[in-house]
Image (cartoon, grey):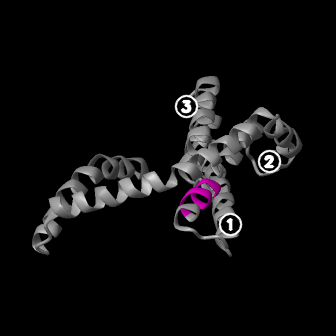
Amino acid sequence: MFERVVNLISAYAIPVLILVIPLYAALKKVKVYEVFCEGAVDGFHTAVRIIPFLVAMLVAIGIFRASGAMDILVKFFSPLTRLFGMPGELLPLALMKSLSGSGANGLLTDALKTYGPDSLIGRMASIMAGSSETTFYVIAVYFGAVGVRKTRHAVPAGLIADVAGILAAVWIAHLMFS
């Protein structure tokens, strides 16, 4: 029954949004095209401002992976992850997701090719990829683009949310697929 509801929602969510948003805008007398174009211009300016921060973050991630630090972390923390029901093979994905979305997508693709999309590891990796955020990327790029120097509670809050997403992914995968 749960699976049917999820499939029904996923089949109709985007078409409903595509219809509801313009209808709501028309009821509110919003000039949709003009507002869309203004947003696109603002988005372009933001994209240009974040390029230096994006390049710096991607270089740092590349150095971290190429240095072998990721492999050392996996070997060190793998026994701990098994206590929580997470295979050690997914630790790089869990760690990379906080750093880089594209790096995490590469690790997700590798896990799906190696273990298969219908395996417990494949399903857990898929849930994990969708349930956490690229915390350090967001902080480095977007906070840097607007000139925020003191992140205050953003880093701890983001990391707590990432850990919660990872633990939830492990729990949900075991609950639904074990």
Q: CA distance from mark 2 to mark 3?
A: 21 Å
Comparing 11 with 68, the one in front is 68
Of labels 2 and 1, earlier in sequence is: 2
Numbered disc 2: secondary structure: helix
Q: Image point 43% across, 58% down: which residue?
A: 46
In the image, residue 128 lies at what x, y percent? Answer: 60, 47
In this picture, residue 172 sits left or right of residue 17: right
Q: Which residues are magenta?
A: 136-142
Relative to 106, say whether 157 is above or below. Answer: below
Residue on which disc 3 sits: 118
Numbered disc 1: secondary structure: helix
Crowdedness near tag 3: few (<14), some (14–19) or many (≥20) residues, C-alpha within 10 Å: few
Q: CA distance from mark 2 to mark 1?
A: 22 Å
Of labels 1 and 3, earlier in sequence is: 3
The quarter holding residue 20 reads: bottom left
Comparing 136 with 167, the one in front is 136
Q: Image point 77% across, 51% down: which residue?
A: 84
Q: Kindly identify the amino acid type of the residue bearing the numbered disc 1.
A: Val
Residue on which disc 2 sits: 81
Residue on which disc 1 sits: 155
Q: Kindly identify the amino acid type of the residue bearing the numbered disc 2.
A: Thr
In this picture, residue 43 sits left or right of residue 33: right
In the image, residue 3 lies at what x, y percent? Answer: 42, 47
Contact between labelled residues 3 and 2, with CB atoms less than 8 Å apart? no
Relative to 8, say whether 114 is above or below. Answer: above
Q: Quadrant of the C terminus?
A: top right
Contact between labelled residues 3 and 1, with CB atoms less than 8 Å apart? no
Question: Of the residues tagged 2 and 1, which is closer to the observer?
Answer: 1
- Please tell me whether residue 138 belongs to the stretch shown in magenta: yes
In the image, residue 122 lies at what x, y percent? Answer: 60, 34
